[in-house]
Image: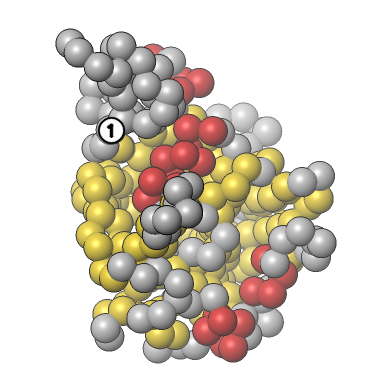
Amino acid sequence: MNGLQGYTLPFSPTGNSSLVPPPPWHFSGDVLMVEYRTDPEAVKAFLPEGLEPGEDPGRAAAIFGDWQSATDDGSELLDPVRSQYKEFYVALSCTWQGKPMVRSPFCWVDRDFSLVRGLIQGYPKKLGSIWITKQFAVGRATPGLAPGERFAGSLAAGDRRLVEARITLESPAEAPALASAPLVHTRHFPAWDQSESDLTELVTGGSEDLRIANVWRGDAELEFFDSPYEELSLLAPVEILAGYRFSFAETITGGRLLARNGR
């Protein structure tokens, strides 16, 4: 085999040193989600050209995910340090040419491979500290899936707590629409040679085999905190709609270009 190999840096003679392997990428995990309304003008300010506010302007969601990921051979499952990570992101309801979509203006993860994998897709990922209540099958140190059980999530970044969420389960429910609507991202890579142009693409993800199970709905609390370095609080809730806890799985195979300009 001639030349250096790999899907992402670092390249090597074999390609095994790449931080991220090529897709398909399979994901399974548990999700805490709080649907809420924020200022519709704030949502509009975060949408790039070509995206319009959704049918319910200002509708948004704060989403915590506890994930395991793998490629086709599943080798990551036998080396969990390569596959497990936690995530928080905000989802804004929007449309592209009249079709319901979701835009994520902010996202944090706690592992480097997830951050780089997200940047390839166009997720605006940064590193943060994310904690989520886990659910186990037995014992008193875990909530169950039953009325009155409580779950929580938190995000901190740059030594500052940015988000706190709490959900009290009430009953089984249908999956919320924002959990499965297609995501629209901006892939942006600045040019290093100043005679060249930046790469800026508006894309939608190539999600397949999406599954949502064990959905519970309930009351929720959600708070965003101010930070001198983050603008998340611009999308703070003005009305809490509902909280959800569910399991989620999908496979990412690639994406589709919508427009060359993604801002």
**Nearer to the camera, 140 or 79:** 79
What quarter of the picture does the C terminus occupy?
A: bottom left
The image shows residue 16, relative to residue 217, as above or below, that is above
Picture residue at 80% right of the left edge, 65% below the top: 226
Which color scheme did the rendering employ for the protein? secondary structure
Dot 1 corresponds to which residue? 22
Left or right of 29 in this view: 180: left
Q: Residue furthest left?
A: 1
Percent from the top left, x then y, of residue 40?
A: 57, 87
The image shows residue 132, relative to residue 224, as above or below, that is above
**Nearer to the camera, 249 or 119:** 119
What quarter of the picture does the N terminus occupy?
A: top left
Count of marks placed on residues: 1
Left or right of 151 in this view: 5: left
The image shows residue 23, relative to residue 107, as above or below, that is above
Percent from the top left, x then y, of residue 258?
A: 26, 69
Left or right of 137 in this view: 128: right
Q: Tell me, yes or no, if residue 18 can be seen here.
A: yes
**Nearer to the camera, 254 or 93:** 254
